[in-house]
Amino acid sequence: MTITEKIFAAHIGKKEVSAGELVNAKVDLILANDITAPIAIQEFKKTGAKDVFDKNRVAFIPDHFAPQKDIKAAEQCKMLREFSKDYRLGLYFEVGRMGVEHALLPEQGLVVPGDLIIGADSHTCTYGALGAFATGVGSTDVAAAMATGECWFKVPESMKFVYYGKLNKWVSGKDLILHTIGDIGVDGALYRAMEFEGETIRNLPMYGRLTMCNMAIEAGGKNGIIVPDNITEEYVKARAKRPYKFYTSDADAKYVEIREYDCSKIPLTVSCPHLPSNTKPATELSHITIDQIVIGSCTNGRLEDLREAAQIIKGRKVNPNVRMIVIPATQQIYKDAMKEGLLDIFIDAEAVVSTPTCGPCLGGHMGILAKGERALATTNRNFVGRMGHPESEVYLSNPAVAAATAVVGKIATPEELGL
């Protein structure tokens, strides 16, 4: 069996499962945010359930339109707060304690290797970086799982992606996943487990792994997953709030497809409008002027991402024709970035630093685009109107390219700044 199949087998109490089986599986954690939880709350109340299945396994995180951007957002967030209080939920994260959900839960040790996790947010697949099965579901699935502790699935087929060779300078997990999506397309892994492995992955730090699994959904994947190893152990051992288990894939496990990538040939990569799969080397886009830079999100808002951007922009200024928004993904990351002087570097460069929020990523707030404007963002999606006006454009990159672009005013690489 693959690692994905083994996690399913463990959560339905069977010795083995195979791709295509319909199963009812126990979930270890359920999460929802201020957009998706209100629907789940309404549907949960219709079930007649007296209580949630486990008060410490349901996480509500207001992060999309929070801090509340308008009256509607305030009403949505209020629903989460009141439900969490009424049902005494142990994992409600109010503004000031919260962060972007998919950065917060791994940081807090609330998702661990071997888990089966569902979230009413498509980027729940992020947690596969820890060796867990994690996937996004609808709000009604969340409502049912809140009552029963279970959810139904079709066990996905698995695709294996093998990465080898040395990464070029400034190339990171973001470039690997953008390159992969560019290769297979936005439906290239439809309802499949995307298993990432190879020597390059074994040497990839956890923040890069989280970025890769985060964007599995952009290739249509049911989940992204990496077999846990020493890097995983190092990350989770001091954080884990629950016991965890490392699963591996058997040598004779079945994969519907195996693809290999020589990472020494993967350049700094940018996704052009209006699909994550529309990828080009950053060096081919130096004629594209940019109005807004966003560094943050559940994809690239971690401390290492901020360090990378700060390293490039230190001692420089944001181009006068550009606005740059930096959003640390959690309060802890914000504090750590402050202690390291990263926020000083950004502010001295004339960038703005925001409190943790998803904000502009989904066209929420804190950086909406006007008609005809272009953004380069470290976020995960660039569909039509994703960050604002339907006639605006979003390009996706890693933090190094984003920071270099902020200085130049056109899509640029750190090499152009002599770095």
Image (tube, rainbow, N blue to C red):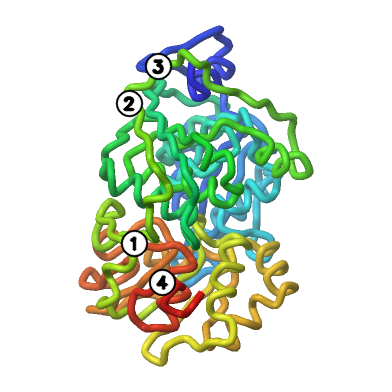
At a point 39% along the width and 83% down the height, the residue shown is: 408
Nearer-the-camera pick, 384 or 169: 169
Choose top left, top right, bottom left or bottom right for residue 397. bottom left
| Dot in front, 4 or 1 | 4
Sequence-first tag of 4 and 1 = 1
Residue 14 is left or right of residue 192, and the answer is: right
Residue under label 1: 270
| Dot in front, 3 or 4 | 4
Tell me the tag on residue 180.
none
Residue under label 4: 413
Residue under label 2: 257
User: Dot 3, crowdedness within 10 Å: few (<14), some or many (≥20)?
Assistant: some
State the CA–CA distance, disc 2 to disc 4: 33 Å
Above or below, 47 relative to 171? above
Q: Amino acid at mark 2?
A: Glu
Above or below, 157 relative to 229? above
Would residue 319 be seen by someone viewing this image from the given angle? yes
Q: Secondary structure at mark 2?
A: strand
At a point 51% along the width and 42% down the height, the residue shown is: 200
State the CA–CA distance, disc 3 to disc 1: 32 Å
Question: x%, y% of residue 218?
Answer: 35, 46
State the CA–CA distance, disc 4 to disc 1: 11 Å
